[in-house]
Amino acid sequence: MYDAGVAALVDTTRDELRERIAHALTRFDQISRSADPHSRVPRSDWTVHQTVAHVLTIAQRYLRYAQGGYRLAARPGEVSVLNQTELETVMAPASELADHVQALAPELDALFDATADEGRSLQFHCGALVDGVTWQTNWLGELLLHGHDVARAVKAPWGLPERDMLLVARGLMQIGPAYVRSTLPPDTDVTVALKIPRARPYLMRIRGAAGEMRPPRDDDHPDAVLRMPASTLTLLLYQRMGAATAARRGLRLVGGRRPWVALKLQSLFEAA
């Protein structure tokens, strides 16, 4: 459920995203080439080698859009199956995979130039429709979060800049409603307001198995009001951390009429 005219969590430009994607790609290239490809990513079934292969398949998936072969998952539970199937088809020495990602960068840049001004008409997993900015911020997130995976596998430092994570979160506000659990009881009704530094006030509402993410309206009555950094919000929505870790990373409950419902927020969404 979405309103094509809804204001985004934060504004950006193609120039900003081009620069940030290029920087993230350079960082990912460096960590992927220096890491032991056999190291296993903590709390993952993948090694560094497989993670780099997955990032390559995401780049290829974007480019297949223009060729009419864009493969997407119909349901959240199918995303991991698609990811595994595709990475197995591209497996090669890790350095070759990294070379291939770099070789596709100019084509991706051209694709993002061509689609930057698209409204919410671009297909995404699970039936979501996103805009051209979200296509770019999703790729930015793939580079940063999977770079983070590789860094954790080899115990190397890896920063997640707040501005980058805010841009990724912007995209998640368009993608997230498609990942609301289809098995939620019909009487589910949860509204959570978000206060993220340097972003518009935003709101997530889950009613039954339908969700919406948008700026708040005067007639909204949030059950919980959460304040947190963009990086914490992003990692929560990707289910890469739980509530306890999020609290250590700046998550604060600052209001609401039923604040305890914030504790079950993650459980309302399917993991990809």
Image (tube, rainbow, N blue to C red):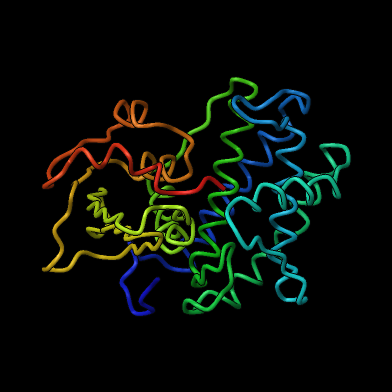
In the displayed structure, 24 sits above or below 155; it is below
Residue 116 location (% of width, % of height) = 53, 74
Q: Quadrant of residue 144?
A: top right
Q: Residue at x 22, y 50 (%)?
A: 195
* Residue at the extreme top of the image, as rendered: 155
Camera-side residue of 235 and 268: 268
Q: Residue at x 39, y 48 (%)?
A: 268
Camera-side residue of 145 and 74: 74
Q: Quadrant of residue 46?
A: top right
Camera-side residue of 224 and 190: 190
In the displayed structure, 92 sits above or below 60; it is above
Q: Is residue 113 left or right of residue 55?
A: left
Residue 26 location (% of width, % of height) = 63, 45
Q: Tally the marks.
A: 0
In the displayed structure, 158 sits above or below 100; it is above
The N terminus, quarter of image: bottom left
Q: Residue at x 68, y 65 (%)?
A: 62
Q: Is residue 16 left or right of residue 196?
A: right
Residue 19 location (% of width, % of height) = 52, 57
Camera-side residue of 44 and 10: 44
Q: Is residue 35 left or right of residue 8?
A: right
Residue 258 location (% of width, % of height) = 15, 44
